[in-house]
Amino acid sequence: MTDWTPTRQHALGLLEDFLPHAGRDYAASRNFDLGPGDRSNVSGLSPYVRHRLIREEEIVSAVRTRHSSSAAEKFLQEVVWRTYWKGWLEIHPGVWPSYRDELTSLTQRLETDLALNARYSDALSGKSGLTCLDQWVRELIENGYLHNHARMWFASLWIFTLKLPWALGADFFYRHLLDGDPASNTLSWRWVAGLQTKGKTYAAQAENIDRYTQGRIRPQEPFASECLPIRGSDVYPTVRLKPRDRVEPGTVALLITEEDLHVESLHLPGTKPVAVAGVQATSDRSRWPTSPLVQGFASGALADGLQRAGVHFDLCTCELESWEHILDWAKSLGVNQVVTAEASIGPVRDRLQVLEASLLRHGVRLVRIRRDWDDALWPLATKGFFPFKEKLPTVLASLGLG
């Protein structure tokens, strides 16, 4: 079983252990789902990257010191896929509230549509009638992780064979995945459903599952004979990214969220941090309870981030009980700036927008520091991944990662 100790030190150890295999070994074996007892063919870094206990550029830099660009191409692409999804969602911000609104509507529908409620409940309790999907449900609940191939198979069977709403499946994943990310999770489910790339769906096939699980899973039940794209809005207005916030010289308070737990690497010229606090929004992922594994990982990761920040800035730290306490905390410090790492679209971003208005009414600026990695790569995610990928060498070189 994978050890998901939620610390930066553990993430650095995972990276070091995986580095020898990040080249051609990974390219040859990455598609195989060997099961929860053997994740040796993948890095296991995704929960740590998702919370930025380890940063993307650190991984890219380390891999490029050990492997040629061609040998490590597949692994490096997986690192930047998450950034691509985040950038695409930033440029198409209407997708996130649309997904949340759809979940609200489905919550109400489950109260009246007893047949849907029964099928949904059976699927979540591992009684869908599809042996492989029921196995993945248990695996996800028990481990907080599924191989990427299994995630696609699961989503395809959920949508096209069980004919359950894609948004309910995305919500189930988001509540249980340790690496659950608003952009990657939502947009990947949309892609399988045929909403993300117009007319293109992903069809799970029994022989494919058999092959890539090396016979560990051999589906016997029939799958959907056709996978037609789900109807839904596939046109969302595009927007330009807002310019980066600029921190002003002087004393500041540092706020840490589970979106970015490496604040010691933030660029804060001319400032003097006087306090560091952390706050969580993990329970905001869904109207239904977030998995204890996810809550535990995020809590442990936040504690680790606070501890490291306290050492780095030589300050006492605290974890605030709720977002509503941030204003009183800032006022008690007498600062006019609260600085945090910019969070991409999702529950933390939603919280920060409310917080920004509240602080501003009391003369305090909320400054969200966008990292160079995000600022360079998010604007490139205007189309599909392959046009994005073609621009990577130039952009990575501009970041000193060429």
Image (cartoon, rainbow, N blue to C red):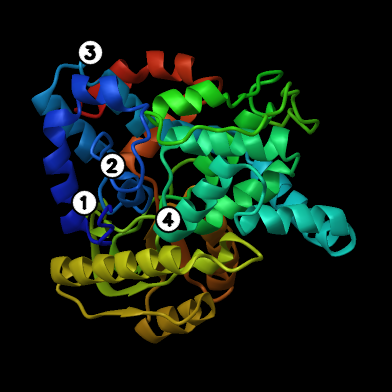
Q: What residue is at 51 percent from the left and 72 percent from the top?
A: 363
Which of pointers 4 and 2 lies earlier in the amino acid sequence? 2
Which of pointers 2 and 1 lies earlier in the amino acid sequence? 1
Gap between marks 2 and 3 measured at Cα: 23 Å
Amino acid type, label 2: Arg
Gap between marks 4 and 1 measured at Cα: 17 Å
Image spot of residue 236 (x, y percent): 71, 32
Res. 283 image quadrant? bottom right
For this rendering, which residue is in front, 40 or 299? Answer: 40
Mark 2 Cα-neighbour bin, 10 Å: few <14, some 14–19, many ≥20: some
Q: Read off the residue under disc 2.
A: 39
For this rendering, which residue is in front, 276 or 1? Answer: 1
Q: Is residue 191 toward the left or the right of residue 241 in the image? A: right
Which of pointers 3 and 4 lies earlier in the amino acid sequence? 3
Gap between marks 4 and 2 measured at Cα: 13 Å
Res. 231 image quadrant? top right
Which of pointers 4 and 1 lies earlier in the amino acid sequence? 1
Q: Nearer the viewer, mark 3 or mark 4?
A: 4
